[in-house]
């Protein structure tokens, strides 16, 4: 027998190649597991090629490591055939582990197939030597090599199947498994080599025609490394792409969730919106119908939100709404729904054990809303008016329930705000009455049903009349004389306030002209303007027109605008007020103290008069805070060179107090109620006689 020897460096290289090939194969099974559609077949074909080349070259380098005393060559056809066998067995193995399941019998059969494939690759490769005479194989070692091939294949298939999913430490486990597999493959090869005996005098038949030479090992090694690294690189890059795709898909899901959140929630407060509320109400109705029980729907409208919004701007308004939403929501059980359905309107849906429980919930909500809010370094005070409907009882469906809750809320508002009202049927008829009133209002101007009443204003010290405020009345054919709070809101909502306001201006100027002619030369007539009129572009022209038509000097007319109106959209207001002031019209800031004025802005206003709100005057004698506020307003007005008027003077005490504080003029029921013009003159005349009678 010829004694063979091994080049130890080549053996080491063959082992490395085997490990690298194993690692590539395992990595590819990972790709196969997550690939979809045609990519599966591409990966399988590419994987089979890479893995086949890897296993084959391990074997071939192993052969090259083997040295006999004679020169060796390799038959090209048989060598190519052994490579083909390696690629086909690898393809089969990859296909097997890419199956969804790998039960034991299938694993055994697969291992047998693959082991046989590797063995036949090996022995076909040996045959490529074309030894003469033939190689003498030791039967025991030959059998052992087959067993190792099948066993290693079984282990490889099992590991590959288990490792194909992404688990933690998958790379490390895969590396360790690759080492085990590589050793098994190498073991099979060298056992097979050990089984081979080369009789003395053998020669290599493939030497003349086949592959031979020193370059062969390098060529094989380099090609193999190239193939394996391309496969590995592609696999790693693809895995990275895949994880990025997965990430994209995840963020898409997230975006979708956000979108539904947006569609069903109010963006400002994050509370459910009208759509989601409607859905929850429908569900609540269905639940009560099936299982009994009851729920309440509460329509919550904030009192005094608009002035804040106008005075501090939308940013502060938005923050305030957010704070309100958070506070009202905070104490509620999670199954209840608090929705924001409009500017400062919220609706609360609460499940109740007993209908009576609604009172407690309503009280809590009203109380919560009335605590001061700290928003962007302002302390803001609000309150809430709340209308309650119960189901079953106060409506058959969603729309009726909401409509009735709204009606109940209006009832709470007109009952003084900062409270709640339960719905009852009469409120519905209220709504119908409002509609009728609106129709009547449209006709009222043409039919001459409006009247102006006049309330006198007096100099605080001399107690002499200095003019009057025109206050609108509606002589309604059925309801009698209506006060402005019954219809001004309606007129503003419908825009009817513009023609009505023009009539008031004209009529007041006409009356003042008459009084001038009767010798009231130092009087001024005051006319109220609503926000809607103030924002109307034709205002300045209608004022000029009313003055001109009646030949009235502009400074005989005082226009009263509320503080809130003047402060809203400060710059635009300033422009309008400036034009009126340039005409010579006298300007008064009405209801002063109820809004939120900025001192800076107040200084720039071309106003002539501040009118202290009735609210402060009313409690003057009981509430020392109000006295402090009034004296502060007086000081402020004096500093700014404004006249100070106090309205709502009802008692002698108030009159004295206000006079002492330094108010310039006074107005109120004590001194004279609003009355028709003839009556005003009559009363003033008799007053003069009574006062002149007293010594
Ligand atoms: P205002 O400008 O604050 O008018 C004063 C209101 O206080 C009047 O109510 C007057 O009757 C009432 N009042 C006067 N003295 C006293 C008093 O001693 N005690 C009490 N408790 N109240 C007193 P009225 O006439 O019902 O007017 C209410 C509001 O309607 C007015 O408030 C004004 O904002 C608005 N208004 C009245 N007339 C017109 C108008 O022609 N055009 C516009 N746009 N608004 C008007
Ligand atoms: Ca007024
Ligand atoms: Ca007022």
Image: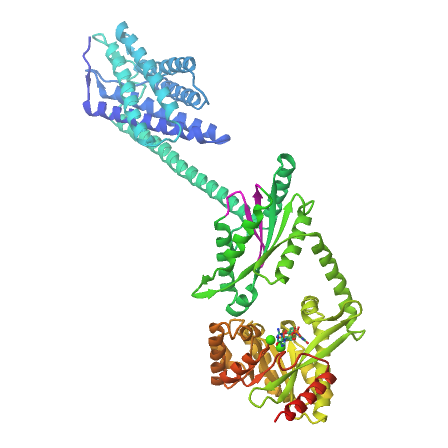
Q: Position of residue 265 (x, y in %)?
A: 55, 50
Toward the viewer: 42 or 651? 651
Q: Is residue 519 above or below residue 179?
A: below
What residue is rendered at 48% in x and 81% in y? 636
Residue 604 position within the rendered picture, expressed as x and y whole percent measured from the top left:
51, 81
The rendered magenta stretch, by its main secondary structure, is classed as strand
Q: Is residue 439 above or below residue 192?
A: below
In the rendered view, does 312 fall on the left or right side of 147?
right
| Camera-nearest residue between 417 and 1 | 417
User: Can you say whether 213 is above or below 430 in the image?
Assistant: above
Q: Which residues are magenta?
A: 332-353
In this view, the residue in front, 679 or 393, is 679
The answer to which quarter of the image holds residue 68 is top left
The part of the image, by quadrant, that contains residue 20 is top left
Q: Residue at x 42, y 29 (%)?
A: 46
Residue 175 horizontal/vertical position (percent): 30, 28
State which image quarter holds ligand 2: bottom right
**Labels in figure, total:** 0
The residue at 73%/86% (across/down) is 510
Is residue 339 located in the magenta-colored stretch of the structure? yes
Give 107 or 592, whichever is nearer the viewer: 592
* Residue 91 seen: yes
Which residue lies at the image location 68% right of the left edge and 66% below the top edge?
493
Is residue 60 among the parts visible in the rendering?
no
Residue 141: x %, y % from top left: 26, 8
Q: Quadrant of the N terminus?
A: top left
């Amino acid at each position: 027998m010829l004694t063979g020897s091994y080049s130890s460096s080549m053996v080491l290289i063959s082992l490395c190649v085997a490990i690298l090939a194993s690692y590539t194969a395992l990595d590819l099974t990972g790709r196969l597991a997550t690939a979809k559609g045609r990519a599966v077949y591409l990966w399988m074909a590419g994987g089979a090629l890479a893995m086949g080349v890897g296993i084959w070259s391990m074997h071939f380098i192993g052969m090259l490591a083997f040295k006999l005393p004679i020169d060796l060559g390799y038959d090209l056809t048989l060598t190519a055939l052994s490579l083909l066998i390696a690629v086909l067995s690898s393809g089969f193995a990859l296909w097997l582990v890419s199956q969804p399941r790998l039960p034991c019998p299938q694993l055994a059969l697969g291992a047998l197939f693959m082991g046989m494939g590797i063995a036949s690759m090996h022995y076909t490769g040996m045959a490529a030597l074309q030894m003469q005479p033939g190689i003498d194989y030791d039967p025991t070692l030959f059998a052992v090599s087959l067993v190792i091939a099948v066993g290693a294949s079984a282990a490889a298939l099992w590991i590959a199947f288990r490792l194909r999913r992404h688990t933690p430490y998958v790379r490390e486990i895969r590396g360790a498994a690759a080492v085990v597999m590589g050793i098994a493959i190498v073991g099979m090869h060298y056992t097979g080599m050990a089984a081979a005996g080369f009789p003395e005098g053998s020669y290599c038949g493939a030497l003349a025609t086949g592959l031979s030479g020193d370059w062969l090992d390098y060529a094989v090694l380099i090609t193999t490394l190239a193939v394996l690294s391309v496969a590995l690189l592609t696999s790693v890059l693809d895995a990275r792409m895949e994880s990025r795709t997965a990430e994209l898909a995840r963020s898409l899901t997230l975006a979708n969730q956000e979108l539904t959140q947006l569609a069903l929630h109010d963006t400002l407060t994050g509370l459910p919106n009208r759509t989601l509320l409607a859905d929850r109400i429908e569900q609540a109705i269905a639940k009560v119908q099936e299982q009994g029980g009851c729920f309440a729907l509460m329509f919550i409208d904030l009192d005094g939100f608009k002035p804040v919004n106008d005075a501090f701007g939308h940013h502060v308004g938005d923050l305030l709404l957010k704070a309100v939403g958070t506070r009202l929501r905070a104490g509620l059980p999670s199954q209840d729904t608090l929705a924001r359905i409009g500017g400062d309107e919220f609706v609360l849906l609460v499940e109740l054990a007993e209908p009576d429980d609604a009172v407690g919930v309503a009280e809590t909500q009203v109380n919560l809303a009335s605590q001061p809010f700290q928003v962007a370094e302002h302390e803001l005070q609000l309150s809430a008016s709340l209308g309650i409907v119960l189901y079953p009882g106060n409506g058959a469906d969603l729309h009726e329930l909401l409509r009735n809750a709204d009606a109940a809320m209006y009832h709470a508002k007109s009952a003084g705000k900062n409270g709640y009202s339960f719905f009852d049927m009469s409120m519905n008829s209220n709504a119908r009455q409002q509609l009728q009133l609106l129709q009547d209002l449209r006709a009222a101007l043409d039919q001459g049903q409006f009247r102006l009443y006049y309330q006198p204003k007096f100099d605080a010290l001399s107690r002499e009349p200095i003019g009057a405020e025109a206050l609108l009345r509606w002589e309604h054919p059925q309801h009698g004389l209506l006060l402005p709070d019954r219809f001004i809101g309606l007129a503003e909502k419908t825009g009817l306030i513009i023609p009505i306001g023009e009539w008031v201006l004209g009529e007041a100027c006409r009356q003042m002209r008459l009084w001038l002619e009767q010798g009231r030369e130092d009087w001024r007539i005051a006319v109220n303007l609503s926000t809607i009129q103030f924002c109307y572009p034709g205002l300045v022209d209608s004022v000029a027109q009313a003055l001109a038509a009646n030949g009235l000097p502009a400074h005989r007319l005082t226009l009263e605008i509320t503080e809130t109106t003047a402060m809203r959209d400060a710059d635009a207001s300033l422009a309008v007020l400036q034009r009126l002031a340039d005409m010579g019209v006298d300007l008064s800031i009405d209801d002063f103290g109820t809004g939120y004025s900025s001192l800076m802005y107040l200084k720039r206003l071309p106003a002539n008069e501040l009118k202290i709100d009735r609210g402060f005057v009313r409690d003057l004698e009981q509430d020392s805070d109000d006295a402090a506020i009034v004296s502060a307003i007086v000081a402020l007005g004096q500093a700014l060179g404004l006249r100070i008027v106090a309205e709502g003077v009802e008692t002698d005490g108030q009159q004295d107090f206000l006079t002492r504080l330094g108010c310039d003029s006074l107005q109120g029921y004590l001194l004279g109620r609003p009355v028709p013009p003839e009556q005003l003159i009559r009363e003033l005349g008799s007053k003069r006689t009574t006062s002149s009678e007293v010594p």
